[in-house]
Image: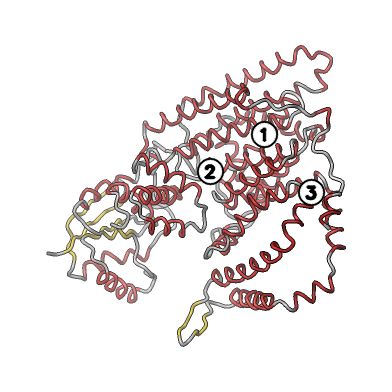
């Protein structure tokens, strides 16, 4: 079969008349110009951020607290050579990938804990987004590639949303950067196919996967659809040959004799039973084992499937993939295998399936595609463009690019597929937030750049080609003059960026942290979901990875059980201090979700005798209060 597939007709990626010798990277003046401008803009944005860095922490329950805390854990784990803590930190990265935390941790290991440097990975991601937008747009065009790239980069650099998230400790900027890097590497691999090109595409996909899996999934679906559209005959031929090459009767006999198949079938049946039951449990050697979630069983079933595939790979896999074409084996080595091994880690596959599914949304969220389109239309206009006219310009240029898409260079369909698939799935998902467009919206600007280049260098100017450079210069200068002045102002958008108009929640931690200087171990609790905020502020202040706890395990809605759990928790832990932060509903810093059960804690503290109230801070304007309890001596 490998020989047959190796001889299958595969269309050339690009016709000889359109082939071009790529300029060496160190002589590519246009790319270096974009890099220089992007670095300058990032410097301006960072300077504006340093004018009011505390305003980034507007309220506690925000993902930025978790991402910065993860970077702190990596950074201090490296500085203190705490291998056990590093392993524990990696193990906790189940919903999000480890890439951002490791990058931020490496920076903090050098600079020391400081949330002002916590945005550097995002700034680098913004620079990378502009550069890869330029490179991808240039790859789309037969002529005028530099103009297309400059326009795409300009849209990225002047976007309020992209500037706002460049000054965040979030994943959005790196997600946009790596998504465009994948598109660019795909265009390179299609237009200049080689094992190295496909290997770099696999590496880019792996980096995106280890940053955030839903960003990765959008690119994989987009590229998969683009490949089917680009060469449907090859894949149809491959499927037919694969079907006829398998001896189905002997194959079925081998499957019936394989014990692992029966184990896999039993585990899949168990997963189905768990899903339809209400908090099931089983008795194992006289001990009740809860099966409220199928994570562990899913992992075990996947491990069995992995073994089956591994046996096949060792016997047939390499030659089978190698015979399909030069691209498949590098993609397997640099992407498929790392991802497959990652899912062997405990609970990774279960969390991945939950994270990309509609279950990852509020219970009252309605799956309305039209509502999603309406919401994202508002956010795209208000958060990601300096003015409505910029949206109209971008839409018009994207329309031109779609009309002339058959004349664009090979692989360009991937950018179109990625944009349309991302728009549909983002709007269809029941959870709607403005930042969900961040990783893929720049693909539209890539098409907009190609649309303008096609307009200026197309048939309309074929009879007077000498005016093309002048038209390109006028168009680029006009866009730059209208948009670049906005870069002198800091930007805040709906779900990201510093907000100087909102008081910083750091005023809460400022009051009690100095009082914990001599405390060996502290318990910090709140009725608001600010445990990550409480943890990172303590770790940054004192550099102690294990000096503070921010929750009581299994604390729930049963008051009597909570009282018993709380007493047992205090008996097991030698705390010197307890801090309670009261952020009631309707107060300045309140944000859902709330941890209403912890509202019972002040009453429980008043009933015990091990701790006495030492200090209390009232924030009358904000409707909040902080109480410090210290151990009696």
Give the labeled residue for mark 2.
Answer: 172
Mark 3 lies on a secondary structure that is helix
Give the labeled residue for mark 3.
Answer: 228
Residue sticking out furthest to the left = 633
| Residue appearing at x 63%, y 51% in the figure | 335
Q: Which of the 4 quarters of the picture holds residue 479? A: top right
Distance in Å between CA atoms under marks 2 and 3: 29 Å
Sequence-first tag of 3 and 1: 1
Where residue 418 appears, as percent x and y from the top left, is 69, 44
Sequence-first tag of 1 and 2: 1
Residues marked 2 and 3 touching at CB (< 8 Å): no
Where residue 405 appears, as percent x and y from the top left, is 79, 35
In the rendered image, the vertical position of residue 284 relative to residue 542, given as above or below: below
Distance in Å between CA atoms under marks 3 and 1: 20 Å
Q: Which of the 4 quarters of the picture holds residue 314? A: bottom right
Residues marked 1 and 2 touching at CB (< 8 Å): no
User: Would you say 410 lies left or right of 566 here?
Assistant: right
Where residue 596 appears, as percent x and y from the top left, is 38, 63
Q: Which mark is residue 136?
A: 1
Q: Which mark is residue 77?
A: none
| Residue appearing at x 75%, y 56% in the figure | 319
User: Would you say 7 lies left or right of 339 here?
Assistant: right
């Amino acid at each position: 079969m490998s020989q047959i597939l190796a001889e299958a007709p595969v269309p050339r990626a690009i016709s000889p008349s359109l082939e071009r010798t790529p300029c060496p990277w160190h002589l590519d003046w246009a790319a270096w110009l974009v890099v220089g401008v992007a670095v300058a803009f990032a410097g301006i944005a960072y300077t504006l951020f340093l004018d009011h860095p505390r305003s980034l922490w507007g309220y506690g329950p925000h993902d930025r607290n978790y991402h910065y805390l993860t970077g702190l854990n990596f950074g201090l784990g490296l500085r203190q050579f705490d291998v056990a803590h590093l392993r524990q930190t990696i193990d906790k990265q189940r919903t999000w990938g480890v890439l951002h935390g490791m990058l931020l941790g490496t920076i903090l290991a050098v600079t020391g804990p400081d949330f002002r440097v916590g945005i550097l990975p995002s700034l680098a991601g913004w620079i990378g987004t502009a550069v890869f937008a330029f490179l991808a747009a240039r790859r789309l065009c037969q002529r005028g590639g530099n103009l297309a790239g400059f326009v795409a980069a300009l849209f990225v650099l002047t976007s309020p949303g992209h500037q706002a998230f460049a000054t965040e400790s979030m994943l959005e900027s790196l997600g946009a950067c790596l998504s465009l890097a994948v598109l660019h590497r795909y265009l390179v691999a299609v237009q200049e196919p080689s094992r190295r090109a496909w290997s770099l595409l696999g590496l880019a996909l792996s980096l995106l996967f280890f940053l955030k899996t839903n960003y990765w999934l959008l690119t994989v679906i987009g590229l998969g659809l683009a490949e089917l559209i680009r060469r449907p005959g090859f894949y149809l031929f491959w499927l037919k040959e694969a079907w006829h090459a398998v001896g189905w009767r002997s194959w079925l006999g081998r499957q019936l004799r394989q014990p692992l198949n029966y184990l896999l079938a039993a585990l899949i049946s168990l997963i189905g039973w768990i899903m339809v039951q209400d908090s099931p449990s089983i008795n194992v050697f006289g001990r009740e084992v809860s099966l409220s979630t199928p994570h562990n069983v899913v992992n075990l079933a996947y491990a069995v499937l992995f073994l089956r595939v591994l046996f096949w790979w060792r016997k047939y896999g390499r030659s089978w993939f190698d015979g399909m074409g030069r691209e498949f084996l590098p993609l397997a080595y640099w992407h498929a295998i790392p991802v497959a091994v990652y899912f062997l880690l405990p609970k990774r596959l279960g969390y991945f399936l939950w994270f990309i599914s509609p279950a990852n949304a509020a219970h009252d969220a309605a799956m309305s595609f039209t509502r999603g389109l309406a919401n994202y239309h508002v956010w795209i206009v208000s958060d990601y463009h300096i003015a409505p006219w910029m949206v109209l310009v971008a839409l018009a240029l994207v329309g031109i690019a779609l009309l002339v898409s058959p004349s664009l260079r090979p692989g360009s369909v991937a950018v179109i597929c990625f944009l349309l698939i991302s728009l549909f799935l983002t709007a269809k998902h029941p959870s709607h937030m403005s930042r969900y467009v961040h990783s893929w919206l720049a693909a539209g600007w890539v098409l907009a750049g190609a649309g303008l280049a096609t307009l200026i260098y197309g048939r309309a100017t074929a009879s007077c080609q000498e005016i093309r450079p002048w038209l390109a210069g006028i168009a680029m200068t006009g866009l730059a003059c209208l948009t670049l002045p906005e870069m002198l102002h800091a930007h805040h958008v709906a779900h990201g960026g510093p907000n100087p108009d909102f008081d910083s929640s750091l005023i809460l931690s400022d009051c009690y942290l100095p009082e914990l200087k001599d405390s060996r171990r502290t318990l910090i609790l709140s009725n608001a979901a600010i445990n990550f905020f409480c943890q990172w502020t303590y770790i940054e202040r004192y550099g102690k990875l294990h000096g503070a706890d921010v929750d009581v395990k299994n604390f729930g809605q049963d008051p009597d059980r909570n009282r018993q759990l709380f007493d047992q928790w205090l008996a097991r832990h030698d705390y010197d201090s307890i801090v309670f932060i009261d952020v009631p509903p309707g107060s300045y810093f309140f944000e859902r979700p709330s941890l209403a059960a912890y509202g019972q804690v002040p009453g429980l503290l008043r009933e015990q005798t091990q701790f006495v109230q030492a200090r209390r801070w009232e924030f009358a304007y904000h409707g909040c209060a902080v109480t410090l309890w210290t151990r009696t001596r």
